[in-house]
Amino acid sequence: MKKEELLHKYFLEELSQEEHSEFTTLLEKDAEFKEQFDFERSVQRAIKSKKRKELQEKIQGFENESNISPKGKVIIWRPLLIAASIALLFSLGIYVFNPFKNDDPLRLYAESYQKYPNTVFPITRGSDQNKSTEFQAFEAYEMNNDAKAIELFKTLQKEQSADYIDFYLGQSYLNNDQALEAITQFQEIISNQQQFSEEAQWYLALAYLKNEDAENAIKALELIHSKKGYKAEEAEKLLEVLKS
Amino acid sequence: MNRSKDDILLEELKKGNDRAFKQVYQDNRNKFLSFAKKYGLEQQDLLDIYQDSYITLFENVVEGKLVKLSSTLSTYLISIGKYKILDRLRKNKQHVNSELVLELTKQKDEYLESFDLETEELTPEEVLLEKYLDQLGEKCKNILILFYYKKYSIREIMKAGKYNSENVVKSQKSRCLKTLKQLFNNTPKRL
C-alpha cells in the first residue's frame, strides 16, 4: 500500500491489523516516513489545542453571561451596558422573545423530562450477580433499552407484586414514547397511593405533555404545586409557561 | 425508533450546533458540581474539571468516538469527571477519604473505553505550529481541521467543500501541509 494511504488511514483510525503492522514496520525502518508521520501528528495536536481554546472561550462566555463569576461574585453591570442591551433587545424584538414564550407541550416535555434513575436495584457491571429477571429488567432500563425493559417489568409483575415494578414500568413506557400506556400506569400508582406516588404525579404531568394534552398536564401540575410535592418548583415554572 | 432528548442533543452537538453546545453545558453544570463536591477540591478546581470534562466529551463526539449513547449525556460527563477528579487528586497529592478514591478507581466505566481522556501538553514546536495555522488560508485551514480533527474521509471532504474529485482534495491537503511545514522550517531556531 502507498505510504500516503497508510497515513491517511492512520489518522482516520481505519488501519486494519495487517496495515497496522506494515505501518509500524515503516515507522521503524523508514526515517522519511517517520518524519512525515511525526509532523502530521503534531499538526493534529496543534489543531486540537486550537479548537480546545475556542471551546474554552465559548464556555467562558456562558459563565460570564450568567453574571456570576466562578467565585460566586456578582459582576456589577454598568448602566451603559444595560441600556445598550435593552436597546438591542428591542431592536431584535419579536425574534428574541418568541423562543422563550414557546409553550408547545412537546417542547416543554423535551426540556423537562429526565428519566428517573434506577434507585432500587444497583447494577454492578461485570460482577457475578446472577442474571435474574429483575437484574435484566433494570439493566435494560439503565441502558435505555426500553422495549426490553417493558417486557421484563411486565413479566416481573406476574411473578411478584412490588410498587417499584409498576413505577419503573411506567418510566419505561414514557421513555419509549408510549405516553398513553405511561399515563394509565402512573394514574394507577397514584390512585392506589403506592410508593413513588409523588414521583408518579410528576411523570404523569410529563406524559400528558408528551401526549400534547396541555389541559390535563396543567391539572396534574397544579396538584403537585398545591401539595408541594416532588418537583414542585419545576411544576410551578411549567405552569407559568403553560398558562401564559 | 425511539429517540430520547439526549440522542437529539448528541446529533446536534456533532453537527456543531452552538445552542446544543450551550444547553448541554448548562443543563449539567450544577448537577456535576454538586456531585463532585464530596472530593474536597476547591470550587474553582471543580469548575475547571467540569469544563475540561465537558470539552473532552465534546471532542470525543466530534471525533466520532461517541456515536450512540449507551447512557445519558450526564452519565458520560460524570464518568469522565470521575476520571479527571482522580487525576487531579493525584497531582495535588491530596489526601481524601480513601473510600471515595477507591470508588473512583474501581469504576472504570466500560463505555469510556474508546474515549480519549488525556490532554497532553503541546511541545514548543507544536505551539509554533498552532500559531502558523492562522497564517494559512481559510480553505487550507478548513481542510486540515476536517481531516485531522473531525476525521472526515477524503471523500467526505470532497463533498463538504464542493471539490471536483478526491484527487483534488488530496493534493490540496498535501499542499497545505507543505506550506505549514515551510513556515515551520523557516522559523529561526533559538536554543
Image (tube, rainbow, N blue to C red):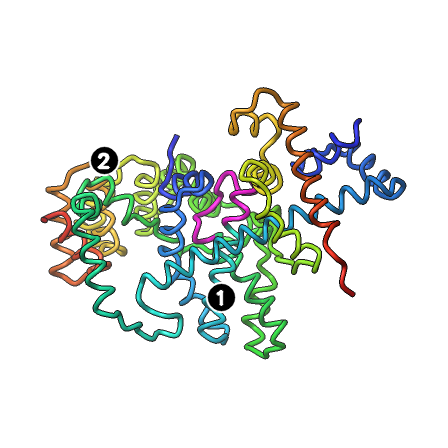
Residue at screen point 79% across, 28% down: A2
The location of residue A219, given as percent across then percent down, is 11, 48
| Foreground label between 2 and 1 | 1
Left-right relation of A241 to B29:
left
Residue bearing mark 1: B48
The outermost residue toward the bottom is B95
Q: Is residue A188 visible to the viewer in this orientation of the structure? A: no
2 and 1 marks on the same chain: no
Please tell me whether residue B71 belongs to the stretch shown in magenta.
yes
- Which three-letter amino acid code belongs to the residue tagged 1? Asp
Depicted B181 relative to depicted B187: above or below: above
Question: Could you tell me which secondary element the residue under label 2 belongs to?
Answer: helix
The location of residue B100, given as percent across then percent down, is 54, 71
User: In the image shown, does A189 or B74 lie closer to the viewer?
Assistant: B74
Left-right relation of A27 to B133:
right
The location of residue B87, given as percent across then percent down, is 60, 66
Badge 1, how many Cα within 10 Å: few under 14, some, many 20+?
Answer: few
Q: State which quarter of the image contains the N terminus of chain A.
A: top right
* Label disc, if present, on residue A180 of the rendered structure: 2
Please tell me whether residue A36 belongs to the stretch shown in magenta.
no
Left-right relation of A65 to A208:
right
The stretch in magenta equals: B58-75
The location of residue B90, given as percent across then percent down, is 63, 71
Badge 2, how many Cα within 10 Å: few under 14, some, many 20+?
Answer: some
Quarter of the image for residue B11 reads: top left
